[in-house]
Amino acid sequence: MRFGNKARFLAVALFAFASQSGIAAAAQCGNDPGGFESWKSQFMQEAQAQGVGSPGLDALSRTSYAQSTIAADRGQKSFKLSLEGFMKKRGADTIIKRGKHMKDIHGAMLDGIERQYGVPPGPLLAIWGMETGFGGYLGNQNILSAVATLAYDCRRSEFFTKHLYAALSLVDRGMLSPSAIGAAHGEIGQTQFLPGNVVRYGVDGNGDGRVDMIGSPADALASTANFLRAHGWQPGAGYQPGQPNFVAIQGWNAAGVYQQAIAIMGEAIDGG
């Protein structure tokens, strides 16, 4: 998963996100497994025409319809809970307790991230705990199959087509293994970035010359801070509802209960 120089990084970003409006029109979306292989065949032709290389095309050819991804996409019931119910279901007390411990363990790393991006440890650790239990569970779905399934599915085809192109570009560059496992919607790594967000916001947090969202907490947390900064985070400002930095947390996840939970847990971890 090595990034090259800045020009290569920008090339990946431009490739993944340049003018998607004319890319996916020909491949016919569907709402059941029946049309997936036909869609995949069409999409592979389009992807090749758009410059996807042999590694990406080969990886795409081996994807399969992910029924469990569709089930998860249709059944996100926890976001309909009250804030209290959501916090209880997600284990907020445990996240806060472990988050404080992680802050002690990773203090130097987190201090460095705050100096560079302006984001304090609390919200980063709350996100890390909420998303994967501090790296304890990264998911059980093949990332490419999940993203390809959602690109095929008519409900949000345009949105996930962009992330599929990003994922294929990551495969082409050796930044993502075709067999990599992630969450139900194809999220990658310790803080669960969608492929396009790896392209846009992924950074090398530990200085080893690689961006490894799966194996490196430093890379994942620095990338998360980079994401929040890009979504309006102001160093030193508050991040509770109504405060300036809450808008950055809103950029991370659209669910109101999730946003509030991150703000509450983050403040508790930061000692508020």
Image (cartoon, helix red, strand yellow):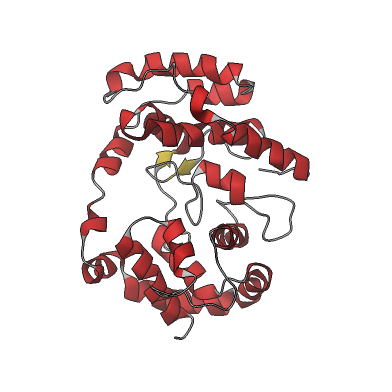
Residue 174 visible in the snapshot = no
Instruction: Check the image and report above or below for 12 versus 38.
Output: below
Instruction: Check the image and report above or below for 83 versus 216.
Output: below
Can you give x and y, in whole percent of width and height, for residue 30 in the image? 31, 22
Quick one: 138 or 249, which is closer to the camera?
249
Quick one: 39 or 142, which is closer to the camera?
39
Can you give x and y, in whole percent of width and height, for residue 139 in the image? 41, 48
Quick one: 243 or 72, which is closer to the camera?
243
Can you give x and y, in whole percent of width and height, for residue 146 in the image? 40, 35
Rendered-image quadrant of the N terminus: top right
Residue 266 visible in the snapshot = yes
Name the outermost residue toward the bottom: 272
The residue drawn where x is 67% and y is 60% is: 205
Rendered-image quadrant of the C terminus: bottom left
Instruction: Check the image and report above or below for 3 versus 53.
Output: below
The residue drawn where x is 47% and y is 79% is: 100
Is 235 situated left or right of 128 in this image?
right
The residue drawn where x is 58% and y is 58% is: 230
